[in-house]
Image: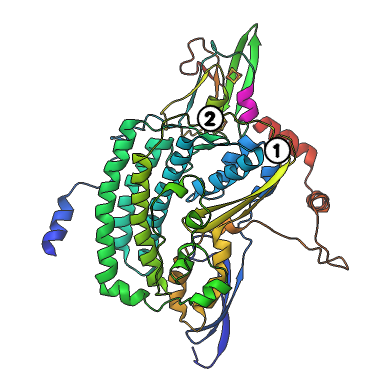
């Protein structure tokens, strides 16, 4: 390609380098990236709307499925908000178990990330190693909660499963193994030349830019921004835990790797403290089915950064509004900055370095009637009518369809 | 290097040899549900709390109820087990639920013993 020519290439919505559909339109000059346009919205699932149509209990499982990796983050953020509206005071033991599962989730998520990062830079051995170790923590999660992925441990007013003495022993044993292995990874991260050279100076996000673009989680902390909801606004049992907020001054992908690795070590410490200081007592208190009118905003430090949930209750069994802001939405803007004037080949690893979760991010789709004069936003009613109308025009007979659905189910 | 390669050739796989060797699920595992019609009083709390509408309780006679569970719809959250005050439902450790025929995913429990479903709808 001629070096002076400027051109645009689309990456995504379907692209082998992306794990989820998302569209990046990259302006290039030769190999150099001039600018990126990011378009979200390919993974919109309408979860917020669906949550309004279900009861609070049903919503826990729906909200949990916003993300397969940080499922506990979302469900905790949601139940915390509901509990705040209902004015429930949770038993200590429940809070400790929530914290414990939250940290186990962080461990599995960071190990997963480390593997993916290794894969993106062609270091697949690292992927195999970390994912092997991730199995240990997945098995522990299954042991404690009853499932490997969507743990379903939260309920309004506490947690659904208690932890026995033997299980606590198992967790401690697993932590010892994982700590050993993580030490090895840290050593590897500090000494392996290929890794250091490939990641250093890639995807730079300065301290000022991190603040200006509102980066969260490890992405912000690797730029020296000392922000962590667990410390700044402690929820669950984090107020009683002793841990450090890890920051790095590198401001690049290498810094993000180190932050995550060191956070793993902190997570093991928190898990040990949870088990050691686990208070006796019940794990749930009775929660009302109808939540009194009110609203609450709840924050949670997910493995990827701050996760925000807003819930508005109107005194019935169903919420009036649920709003979710996943950490990736806060971080994705920073990707533009990180890739500016860099090479196209850095794109996969820089995107992977914010640990994106695009399907969690796609919350809102606003539809505009382009064919009408004022191009106004469509509301629910018009959208419904429009879609029924559109399908009728395609020759779909709703009566027949309904009948078919009934006989099939 | 060569030694490493040769060793790997004769090493047994690191993964589980699945159909022959099965993993045992942990005790709290939320697998396929089990229903005990003797205990059920037909309050339908399970139906009300189920997030997916996978469970249906039908009245089949005087104080007799059967449960129809759509295993394809069920997300194995075991909320119904928690909601049932009479402990008529129970989560088992069974995980091998794949079927060739979609109809077989719908299981009806009406047997007195509450064991394996006597008839598959
Ligand atoms: S909640 Fe229990 S007792 Fe009530 S209908 Fe369901 S299975 Fe039967
Ligand atoms: S396990 Fe969950 S999804 Fe399945 S029937 Fe029970 S409540 Fe419904």
Query: Residue A347's spot in the image, x, y percent?
Result: 47, 74
Specify how the rendered protein is coloured. rainbow
Please tell me whether residue A51 is drawn above or below residue A301 in the rendered image.
above
Furthest toward the right, the residue is A373
Please tell me whether residue A15 is drawn above or below residue A103 in the rendered image.
below
Tag 2 secondary structure: helix
Please tell me whether residue B67 is drawn above or below residue A161 in the rendered image.
above
Look at 65% across and 6% down and name the residue there.
B62
* Residue B82 relative to residue A84: left or right: left
Nearer-the-camera pick, B30 or A210: A210
Tag 1 secondary structure: loop
Please tell me whether residue A219 is drawn above or below residue A235 in the rendered image.
below
For mark 2, name the chain.
Answer: B
Give the number of the mark in front: 1 or 2: 1
Residue at numbered disc 1? A318
Magenta extent = B44-49
Nearer-the-camera pick, A215 or B118: A215
Furthest toward the left, the residue is B3
Query: Residue A195's spot in the image, x, y percent?
Result: 31, 71
Q: Which disc number belongs to residue B105?
A: 2
Q: Magenta stretch mostly in which secondary structure? A: helix
Residue A201 in which image quadrant: bottom left
Query: Residue A291's spot in the image, x, y percent?
Result: 69, 36
Q: Quadrant of the C terminus of chain A?
A: top right
Query: Residue A285's spot in the image, x, y percent?
Result: 55, 30
Nearer-the-camera pick, A61 or B102: A61
């Amino acid at each position: 390609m001629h070096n002076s020519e400027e051109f645009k290439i689309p990456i995504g919505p379907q692209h082998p380098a992306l794990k989820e559909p998302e569209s990046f339109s990259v302006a290039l000059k030769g190999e150099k990236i001039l600018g990126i346009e990011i378009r979200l919205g390919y993974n919109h699932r309408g979860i917020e709307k669906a949550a309004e149509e279900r009861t609070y209990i049903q919503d826990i499982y729906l909200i949990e499925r916003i993300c397969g990796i940080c499922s506990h983050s979302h469900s905790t953020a949601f139940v915390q908000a509901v509990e705040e509206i209902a004015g429930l005071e949770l038993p200590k033991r429940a809070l400790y178990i929530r914290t414990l599962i939250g940290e186990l989730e962080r461990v599995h998520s960071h190990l997963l990330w480390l593997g993916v990062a290794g894969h993106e830079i062609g270091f697949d051995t690292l992927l195999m190693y970390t994912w092997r170790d991730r199995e240990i923590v997945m098995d522990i999660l299954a042991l404690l909660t009853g499932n490997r992925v969507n743990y379903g441990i939260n309920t309004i007013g506490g947690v659904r499963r208690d932890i026995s003495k033997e299980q606590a022993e198992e967790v401690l044993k697993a932590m010892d193994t994982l700590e050993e292995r993580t030490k090895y990874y840290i050593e590897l991260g500090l000494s392996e030349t290929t890794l250091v050279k490939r990641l250093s100076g890639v995807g730079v996000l300065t301290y000022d830019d991190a603040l200006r673009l509102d980066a969260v989680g490890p992405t912000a902390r690797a730029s020296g921004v000392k922000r962590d909801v667990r410390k700044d606004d402690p929820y669950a049992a984090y107020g009683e835990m002793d841990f450090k907020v890890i920051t790095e001054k590198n401001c690049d992908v290498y810094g993000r790797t180190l932050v995550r690795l060191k956070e793993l070590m902190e997570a093991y410490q928190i898990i040990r403290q949870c088990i050691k200081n686990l208070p006796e007592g019940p794990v749930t208190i009775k929660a009302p089915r109808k939540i009194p009118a009110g609203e609450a905003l709840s924050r949670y430090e997910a493995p990827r950064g701050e996760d925000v949930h807003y819930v508005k209750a109107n005194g019935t069994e169903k919420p009036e509004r649920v709003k979710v802001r996943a950490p990736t939405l806060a971080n994705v803007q920073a990707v533009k900055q990180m890739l500016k004037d860099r090479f196209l080949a850095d794109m996969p690893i820089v995107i992977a370095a914010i640990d994106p979760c695009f399907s969690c991010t796609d919350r809102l789709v606003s539809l505009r009637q382009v064919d009408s004069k004022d191009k106004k936003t469509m509301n629910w009613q018009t959208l419904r009518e429009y879609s029924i109308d559109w399908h009728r025009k395609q020759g779909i007979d709703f009566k027949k369809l309904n009948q078919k659905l009934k006989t099939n189910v | 290097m060569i030694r490493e390669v040769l060793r790997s050739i004769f090493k047994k796989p690191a993964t589980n040899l699945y159909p022959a060797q099965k993993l045992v699920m942990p005790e709290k595992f939320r697998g396929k549900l089990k229903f005990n019609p003797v205990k059920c009083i037909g309050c339908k709390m399970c139906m009300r709390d189920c997030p997916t509408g996978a469970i249906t309780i039908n009245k089949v006679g005087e104080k007799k109820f059967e449960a129809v569970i759509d295993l394809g719809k069920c997300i194995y959250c075991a909320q119904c087990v928690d909601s049932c005050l009479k402990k008529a439902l129970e989560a088992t450790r069974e995980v091998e639920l794949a079927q060739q025929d979609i109809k077989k995913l719908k299981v009806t429990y009406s047997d007195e013993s509450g064991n394996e479903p006597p008839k598959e709808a």
